[in-house]
Image: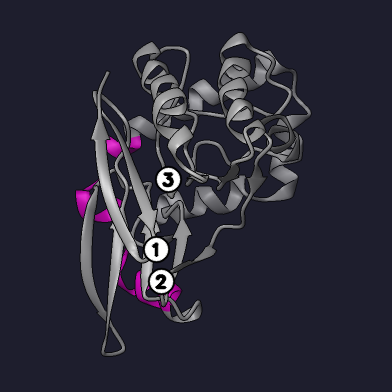
Amino acid sequence: MTLVISDLHLCEERPDLTALFEHFMQEIAPQSNELYVLGDLYESWIGDDDDSTFVESTIALFKAYSDSGKKLYFQHGNRDFLLGDTFADKTGGELLPEVHPIQLGDKQAIMMHGDSLCWDDKEYMQFREMVRSEQWQQQLLSQPLEVRRGIAADLRGKSREAQENKASAITDVHPQAVEEVLKDHKAQVLIHGHTHRPDFHDIEVEGKHCQRIVLSDWGEKGHYLTIEGDSVAEHYFTI
């Protein structure tokens, strides 16, 4: 069985989310063979050299999972795009590209975080292009940890303010973006997070039935998908 999660937004300021995550990794994840994390695992990620107790404790839970012989995969989100090879090594996981193909029975599926599909949010798309550039990332990572923590807090605040002032449709995926990525990868199913709007959407692409499956963010409840063969099911849990 495969598990898929996204948009946990873990941070020291939300011990409730950390408790949900601990429960998931200790009680639910061991039932699976592999786990995919589709971005925004953390509310922010300031670099793989972050040695805080909070970060180390979350890494240890992933390491216990991979040490048991299970496969672990991560995609970058818009909050934790600085996750790097050192993080992957510490967790025993693998960093995936922005679009990752998987097989669902006889169907081709792809997994994404989903932020690159929000074409109408032009302000964010410009910001995304800037922060994904190697030059910008190198410049940020050259700063001391405490400076990076301050920059991350400032960016989080600006992001929250910007989201509050945007129409709901602007922050959702663009239908054409969804169609294009499905066509480009010859896929019939798209699984993504980012929008915090969980649902199973039936869509038509070039006359063919396709599906877009959206993961929820975590709050009072945790949310995950199970994949077995060609079957995808969603689950919520509390502690």
Disc 3 residue type (three-letter) = Leu
Mark 3 or mark 2: which comes first in sequence? 3
What kind of secondary structure does the magenta stretch mostly adopt?
A: helix
Q: In the drawing, does residue 36 fall left or right of residue 24?
A: right
Disc 1 residue type (three-letter) = Gly
For residue 121, above or below residue 5 = below
> Which residue is found at the position 42% from the left and 55% from the top?
114
> Which residue is found at the position 73% from the left and 48% from the top?
134
Q: Residues within 10 Å of mark 2 (few under 14, many from 20)?
A: few
Q: Do callouts 3 and 1 mark residues in contact (Cβ within 8 Å)?
A: no
Residue 3: mark in rendering? 3
Real-space CA distance between mark 2 and mark 1, rounded to the nearest whole angstrom: 5 Å
Residue 9: mark in rendering? none
Q: Residue 124: give x, y in percent of width and height.
A: 43, 49
Residue where numbered disc 2 is placed: 105
Which stretch is magenta? 162-182
Mark 2 or mark 1: which comes first in sequence? 2
Looking at the rendered image, the quarter that the C terminus falls into is: top left
Is disc 2 placed on a helix, strand or loop?
loop
- Residue 172 visible in image: no
Q: Residues within 10 Å of mark 1 (few under 14, many from 20)?
A: few
Q: In the drawing, does residue 84 fall left or right of residue 124?
A: right
Is disc 3 placed on a helix, strand or loop?
strand
**Is 144 or 20 nearer to us in this picture?**
20
Q: Residues within 10 Å of mark 3 (few under 14, many from 20)?
A: many
Q: Do callouts 2 and 1 mark residues in contact (Cβ within 8 Å)?
A: yes
State how the image is colored: one colour
For residue 119, above or below residue 171 = below
